[in-house]
């Protein structure tokens, strides 16, 4: 944005210096101006509503420079979306994609959660997340094994993002939000609900359906479906 503003500023400065500046004062001048490259511009609050093309570009370049100065001083909002994601479901994906429209940066924090004995290793879950969100430049997927609040602070994040599927989730999430507020008052917890068609999906249910040979293509990304098949085949051969 800054580059574009400077380019426009230099261009219109050259035009202002190299061309006669004229203003339209009556209808006759307006008709003659039509062939002189003068355009009518009424969106800006100015005593003169009619600008030459060079003046319009100058005004626009100044607007762009002011906007860039404002953006450079604004604090970028970073949201952390934590979870085990064993595996990622379409509900998780929906929340991340919607969060990417709300925040400047979204970090999908994949917890190691060794005590849960996950189906996939941490590195595999991180890799799957990166494949799913490869088209979102503001989304980063990384693993962690520390206290969540410590990880949030290490990323200089201001938002802790949590997904709510049903009322049954609320009591647990409300308790966790209260504890996190005590540990880090500067971090805000924000809840998002997935789209209606994903409200009932959970990683546990997806794993169980896949283990019993059911079709999970409606509940997960194709990358996840393929990885699930391979992982469960590998698991069955080890028994």
Image (tube, grey):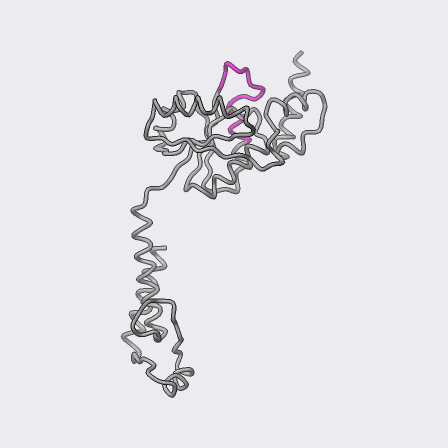
Residue 186 image-quadrant placement:
top left
Q: Main secondary structure of the magenta part?
A: helix
The percent position of residue 163, horizontal first and vertical second, equals 51, 31
The percent position of residue 53, horizontal first and vertical second, equals 37, 73
Residue extent of the magenta highlight: 113-128
In this rendering, position of residue 32 left or right of residue 66 = right
For the N terminus, which image quadrant? bottom left
The one of 133 and 127 positioned closer to us in this rendering: 133
Residue 231 image-quadrant placement:
top right
The percent position of residue 225, horizontal first and vertical second, equals 64, 30
Residue 58 image-quadrant placement:
bottom left
Q: Residue at x 57, y 22 (%)?
A: 120
The one of 98 and 233 positioned closer to us in this rendering: 98
Q: Residue at x 30, y 57 (%)?
A: 66
Outermost residue on the left side: it is 17
The percent position of residue 207, horizontal first and vertical second, equals 63, 22
Q: Is residue 189 magenta?
A: no
Q: Residue at x 35, y 64 (%)?
A: 60
Above or below residue 236? Residue 81 is: below
């Amino acid at each position: 944005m800054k580059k574009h503003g400077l380019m426009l500023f230099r261009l219109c400065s050259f035009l202002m210096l190299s061309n006669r500046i004229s203003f339209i004062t009556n209808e006759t001048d307006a008709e003659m101006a039509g062939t002189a490259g003068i355009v009518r511009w009424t969106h800006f609050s100015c005593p003169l509503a009619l600008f030459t093309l060079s003046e319009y570009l100058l005004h626009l370049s100044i607007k762009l420079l002011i906007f860039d100065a404002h953006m450079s001083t604004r604090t970028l909002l970073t949201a952390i979306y934590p979870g085990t994601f064993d595996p990622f479901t379409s509900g998780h994906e929906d929340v991340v994609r919607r969060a990417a429209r709300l925040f400047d940066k979204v970090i999908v924090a994949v917890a190691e959660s060794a005590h849960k004995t996950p189906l996939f290793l941490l590195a595999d879950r991180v890799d799957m997340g990166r494949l799913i969100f490869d088209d979102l430049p503001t989304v980063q997927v990384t693993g962690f094994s520390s206290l969540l609040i410590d990880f949030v602070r290490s990323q200089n994040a201001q938002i802790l993002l949590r997904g709510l599927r049903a009322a049954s989730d609320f009591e647990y999430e409300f308790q966790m939000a209260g504890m996190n507020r005590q540990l880090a008052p500067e971090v805000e917890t924000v809840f998002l609900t997935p789209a209606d068609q994903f409200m009932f999906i959970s990683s546990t249910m997806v794993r169980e359906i896949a283990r019993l040979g059911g079709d999970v293509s409606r509940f997960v990304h194709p990358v996840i479906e393929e990885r699930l098949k391979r992982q469960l085949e590998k698991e069955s051969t080890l028994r």
